[in-house]
Image: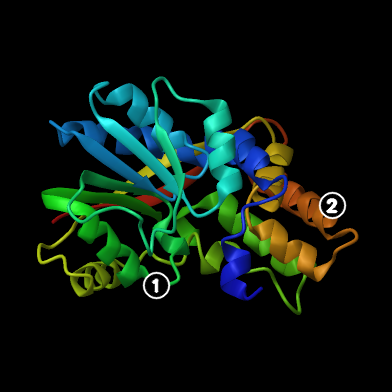
Amino acid sequence: MGQAGVDTLFAGSIPELYDGLMVPLIFEPYAADLARRVAALGPLTRVLETAAGTGVVTRAMAKALPASVELVATDLNPPMLERAAAVGTARPVQWQPADALQLPFDDASFDVVVCQFGVMFFPDKVRGFAEARRVLRRGGTLLFNVWDSLEHNEFAATATTALAGLFPTDPPRFMARVPHGYFDRQAIAKDLSDAGFDVAPRIETLAARSRAASAEAAAIAYCQGTPLRNEIMARSPATGLIDATAACQSAIAQRFGAGPVDGKIQALVVAVQR
């Protein structure tokens, strides 16, 4: 499996740890924000979510949107959707494994396409945006968010630095390369234009706070609940995960304290009309 495959592999124990630790740590405030923005676009009849993961945005939209709106939630990784379906939603949702770069839906069949922190994982972002545009009805909206750079996301930056110290000759760079690697506004606008969107996107910076019960919880979330785990295991299959979690825990505690921890997170929210 190549690097791209490792970067998008959410399997094994990752879905449960991701949903239990990463979702409350960094995803919930942005999920609520996206759900509010989708609701404001109404009236709607059909909404598609790509890269739905374990369903944090899906659950928020299920509460925010009228029961008459059909929700279709997709993800490339069936284990993530299985976790999402097991957690459940306030009302019925159609869960469907699907590749955002090759959507199994008809042209012009959705009012809104939503993607929370997923486009960074697209190996071909222009193609992913073009597919979203294809399934949008005229006047429909693509709404997504991406993480800002590491310097604006304190726990992720701290963990990345700690792991560079643990593996100095070959540091795991997943966080910098993928989740925090697609924040250039001009690049985003160009990719959307190349995908066929002829209206300039609206891009907003949105800061929030990331909180965990302890430095240990934050370290476990990053090292064991994301594909960063795959990079760590590849470098040290026997003890790497334990050592990496301990190193990140120590670094986070040193910077943010030994008790409950609180750090800055920041993202870009992008909306563009078909």
Choose top left, top right, bottom left or bottom right for residue 148.
bottom left
**Where residue 123 sits in the image (x, y, percent)?**
45, 71
The residue depicted at 39 percent of the width and 25 percent of the height is 92
What's under tag 1, amino acid-wise?
Asp
Residue beneath disc 2: 242
Residue beneath disc 1: 124
**Where residue 131 sits in the image (x, y, percent)?**
29, 62
The number of callouts visible is 2
Q: In this view, does 108 lie to the left or right of 24?
A: left
> How many neighbours does mark 2 have within 10 angstroms: few (below 14), some (14-19), or many (20 or more)?
some
Q: Quadrant of the C terminus?
A: bottom left
Residue contact at pointers 2 and 1, CB within 8 angstroms:
no
Q: In this view, does 180 lie to the left or right of 170?
A: left
The residue depicted at 34 percent of the width and 30 percent of the height is 61
**Where residue 262 sits in the image (x, y, percent)?**
56, 37
Choose top left, top right, bottom left or bottom right for residue 157.
bottom right
Sequence-earlier tag: 2 or 1: 1
> How many neighbours does mark 1 have within 10 angstroms: few (below 14), some (14-19), or many (20 or more)?
few
Query: Is 199 or 90 nearer to us in this picture?
Result: 90
Of helix, strand and loop, which one carries label 1? loop
What's under tag 2, amino acid-wise?
Ile
- Which one is closest to the eye, mark 2 or mark 1? 1
The residue depicted at 18 percent of the width and 49 percent of the height is 141
- Any mark on residue 132, and which? none
Q: Give the Cα separation between the discs numbered 2 and 1.
A: 34 Å
Query: Is 137 or 31 nearer to us in this picture?
Result: 137
The residue depicted at 66 percent of the width and 44 percent of the height is 221
Q: Quadrant of the N terminus?
A: bottom right
Q: Is residue 169 left or right of residue 27?
A: right
Query: Is 69 or 118 nearer to us in this picture?
Result: 69
